[in-house]
Image (cartoon, rainbow, N blue to C red):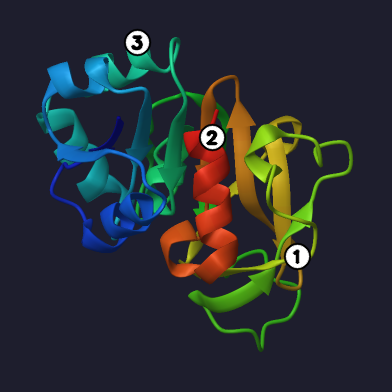
């Protein structure tokens, strides 16, 4: 069973529907017992980092998530991925879950092409990090396939854990991994067949 963490941030329907379409059992939950019973955990998220972090902390699930990532795969999606890092600099300085080394910073500050719009919205090619092509998350996904992004902040100083990037005048961190903890800045559930194949690979981990 794949548990989707519900902490009051974002519309979970499309993600749950995508996973169900793969034939997997899905449960949207805010209960610790469900996360402990699950084989896989999805941590979605949209909106502002500080608000999401506060809501997640208020559920009491943070210690549970930390414990469960020692035993089973977790995939953070979009803001859910950003929450995995040590620190975010989105409207202040905020502490993340510390599950993946790195920090989340404003994309606009680092773009080499100032004419590019922020937020970074739309389809972009996935550049799998050399040597990471065999990661099981990419079992059904090839280098250069397109995925869908919506974000204004991105992960930095995380090269050792970066599985893939996408070019937006700079390499934008697209996917990361630390042990059983995975993250995608893009939305698999909005990335068409490519995203479904990635979710299938995650479900098979």
Residue carrying label 3: 67
Badge 2: residue crowd in 10 Å (few <14, some 14–19, many ≥20): many
- Of marks 2 and 1, the one in the foreground: 2
Examine the rendered structure and indicate whether residue 75 appears above or below residue 51. Answer: above
Residue 182's disc number: 2
Q: Quadrant of residue 142?
A: bottom right
Q: Examine the rendering and report whether any part of residue 154 can be seen.
A: no
How far across and down, in percent of the image, does residue 49 sit? Answer: 32, 49
- Of marks 1 and 3, the one in the foreground: 3
Q: Residue at x 54, y 79 (%)?
A: 122
Examine the rendered structure and indicate whether residue 145 appears above or below residue 162. Answer: below
Residue 183's disc number: none
Farthest residue, direction right: 130
Examine the rendered structure and indicate whether residue 38 appears above or below residue 155. Answer: above
Q: Is residue 82 left or right of residue 134?
A: left
Q: Residue at x 55, y 66 (%)?
A: 193
């Amino acid at each position: 069973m794949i548990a989707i963490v519900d902490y009051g941030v974002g519309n979970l329907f499309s993600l749950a529907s995508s996973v169900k379409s793969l034939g997997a059992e899905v449960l949207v939950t805010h209960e610790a017992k469900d996360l402990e019973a699950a084989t896989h955990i999805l941590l979605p998220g949209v909106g502002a980092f500080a608000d999401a972090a506060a809501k997640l902390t208020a559920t009491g699930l943070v210690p549970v998530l930390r414990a469960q990532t020692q035993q089973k795969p977790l995939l953070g999606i979009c803001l859910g991925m950003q929450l995995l890092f040590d620190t975010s600099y989105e409207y202040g300085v905020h502490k993340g879950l510390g599950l993946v080394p790195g920090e989340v910073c404003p994309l606009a500050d680092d773009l080499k092409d100032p004419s590019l719009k922020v937020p970074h919205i739309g389809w972009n090619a996935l550049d799998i990090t050399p040597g990471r092509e065999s990661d099981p998350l990419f079992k059904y996904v090839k280098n250069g396939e397109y995925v869908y992004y919506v974000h204004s902040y991105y992960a930095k100083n995380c090269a050792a854990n970066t599985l893939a990037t996408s070019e937006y005048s700079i390499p934008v961190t697209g996917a990361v991994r630390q042990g059983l903890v995975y993250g995608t800045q893009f939305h698999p559930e909005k990335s068409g067949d490519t995203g479904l194949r990635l979710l299938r690979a995650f479900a098979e981990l």
